[in-house]
């Protein structure tokens, strides 16, 4: 099952790429959220926004970085709907009842 999900993720990524798209296929609302996120004063030197394939869709994880040990990383779908958060004081590792370890990293779309 995991192999099937990985193959699906790679095929979705391969066929969704457009060389003339300077945003790399990142939705406008996510680009706007990244712009706002990148200006936050609370970001650590390793802050980043990553794109993943998770639960049969593309999602984006906004991480403030490792200097905020009890902070959470927001997880958003392509329509900018918050679908969960990771980390925090409890160390949450699940989104919608599924371990985020099943997510397939596609790329980093922004880093500090």
Image: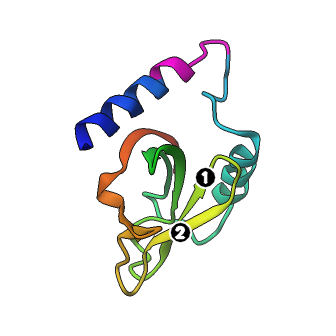
Give the vertical position of 41 relative to 57 (above or below). Answer: below
Mark 1 neighbour density, 10 Å: few (under 14) some (14–19) many (20 or more) = some
| Residue drawn at point x = 53 percent, y = 69 percent | 84
| Residue drawn at point x = 58 percent, y = 72 percent | 42
Determine which quarter of the picture holds residue 23: top right
Alpha-carbon span between mark 1 and mark 2: 10 Å
Q: Is residue 25 left or right of residue 65?
A: right
Residue carrying label 1: 77
Q: Secondary structure at mark 1?
A: strand
From the image, which quarter does the N terminus lie in? Answer: top left
| Residue drawn at point x = 38 percent, y = 77 percent | 92
Query: Which region shows up in magenta?
Result: 14-20
The picture places residue 11, in percent across and down from the top left corner, at 42, 23
Q: Secondary structure at mark 2?
A: strand
Determine which quarter of the picture holds residue 43: bottom right
Q: Is residue 5 magenta?
A: no
Hey, which residue is sitting farthest top in the picture? 19
Coloration of the structure image: rainbow
């Amino acid at each position: 099952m995991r192999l099937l999900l990985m193959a699906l993720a790679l095929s979705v990524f391969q066929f969704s790429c457009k060389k003339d798209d300077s945003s790399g296929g990142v939705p406008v609302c996510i680009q706007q959220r990244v712009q706002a996120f990148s200006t936050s004063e609370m970001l650590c030197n390793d802050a980043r926004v990553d794109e993943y394939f998770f639960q049969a869709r593309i999602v984006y994880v906004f991480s403030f970085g490792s200097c905020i040990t009890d902070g959470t990383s927001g997880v958003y779908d392509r329509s900018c709907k918050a679908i969960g958060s990771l980390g925090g004081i409890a160390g949450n590792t699940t989104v919608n009842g599924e371990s985020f370890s099943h997510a397939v990293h596609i790329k980093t779309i922004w880093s500090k």
